[in-house]
Image (cartoon, rainbow, N blue to C red):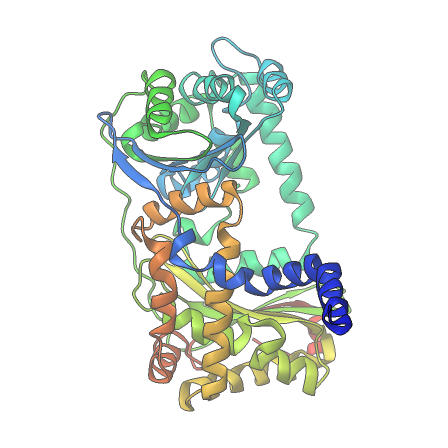
Amino acid sequence: MRNFKSCEVNNTLKKYLPILTLILILTLAPVLISTPALAIEAQREVLPNGLILLFSERDNLPIVKATLLIKASPLNEPAEKAGLANLTAELLMEGTKSRTSEDISEGIEFIGAGLDVSVDRDYTEISLSVLKKDIRRGLEILSDVLLNPTFPGKEISRKKAIIKGSLRQMEEDPGFVASRKFRSAIFGTHPYGRLVEGRNETIDSITRNDIVKFYNTYYHPNNAILSIVGDLNKKEVRDLVEKYLYGWKKAPIPEVKKFTVTPRGKPLVITVDRKLTQANIILGNPGIKRSNPDYYAVSVMNYILGGGGFASRLMAKIRDDMGLAYDIRSAFSSDKYAGVFYVGVQTKNGSARKVIDVILEEIKRIRNEPVTTEELSDAKAYLTGSFPRRLDTMGKIAGFLALTEFYGLGIDYDMNYPEYINAVTKEDVQRVARKYMDPEDYVLVVVADIKKTGIQK
């Protein structure tokens, strides 16, 4: 005899089983993503021409993502030619020996691919996104852009005008002005202290000969990293690279000049007077380079101080308790050779002085008092739990692999990162707070209706 209640329960379970399964998957997803079983399985090889090749096979989608990192940046340009690295990169897709800029654009669009070039403070990046069936066509265009640019004079003039127009527009943004002034004050004449795009006068001084010389000096395989992720096996990757980058020849690369940031020993206050209702404030000091072993303790400390959004001390104090700002953030921005720590906030002109005082008080507090067990645990949980989101697409993985190689973090960095974060102690947090933040030696930039802020230099 069948039990009616048992049948009813079974039918109910069948009815809701898909929903329960979905809930279970969503609940376990963060754990599953962060397990070693789903770590990046990447391979590294140095080719005969010096090019570092990184490869990870992902056959879940018929897509290929490639990131080419070239160590050509503002670090390699003279100050009087600031913007040279950026202008050189901008012109790569504006004509080759066999293609016009229109040909390049139409060729990429025809296969539904994406080809982009950008410049960071440390490197130039060329990225390709293409379906596997069109990978040969995509790499053919990429290699042509990379190996055979012609830098037409007409396009140089056009690009210069576009960049200068963009700079004029950005100067209307008080946040941009504050950031520009801040980096300049921290780094002085070093390339990290100036805009990647350069200034109007330095852009005007750049000639075609400057561009060609810069390209011929730094665009070489032994000065580059190529990361390929997607539906290709190792042999296919190697055959493609040999076919389309065969003509890329190695050459001697000049060394980057080393520099140090000298402590000031006292605060530097920079004000920019504008008729604004909101004061744009940046307060900070020199930070750390990306390869610094303290990077992980600094990450945890910064999350607690102001990098954790609504979970951070600065947000809780200045927004929630005092109602003086809608948003406030702190960050350590780390590059190859140096970095900066800064707190950024917008507030009413009349509240600017009070907000600055509270920021300095919170910096002193995290230097002088140990963080709580709960703060430390929450920071670690967020940093390790959110880490897989950096690797949830093929494009992100390709960029991630290239950068871990560039910064010397190791090909197994994705496996090691959680361990680095979880090893941070309360003592580490307080130590790095004292070492890398100084409430008596900082740069403060305020863009506001200065008279209403009551701030004086």
The answer to whether residue 437 is left or right of residue 118 is left
Q: How many marks?
A: 0
Q: Is residue 439 above or below residue 38?
A: below
Residue 368: which quarter of the image? bottom left
Q: Residue at x 43, y 47 (%)?
A: 400
Q: Position of residue 300 (x, y in %)?
A: 44, 73
Q: Position of residue 343 (x, y in %)?
A: 55, 71
Q: Position of residue 289 (x, y in %)?
A: 35, 59
The residue positioned farthest toward the bottom in the image shown: 369
Residue 402 shows in this picture: yes
Task: Give 51 or 30, whichever is nearer the viewer.
Answer: 30
Q: Residue at x 50, y 45 (%)?
A: 396
Task: Give 255 or 23, whichever is nearer the viewer.
Answer: 23
Residue 292: which quarter of the image? bottom left
Q: Is residue 126 above or below residue 454?
A: above
Task: Give 351 or 359, whichever is nearer the viewer.
Answer: 359
The answer to whether residue 20 is left or right of residue 342 is right
The answer to whether residue 324 is left or right of residue 67 is right
Q: Residue at x 54, y 27 (%)?
A: 130
Q: Position of residue 406 (x, y in %)?
A: 34, 45
Looking at the rendering, in which quadrant would you find the C terminus?
A: bottom right
The residue positioned farthest toward the front in the image shown: 1
Residue 302 shows in this picture: no
Looking at the rendering, in which quadrant would you find the N terminus?
A: bottom right
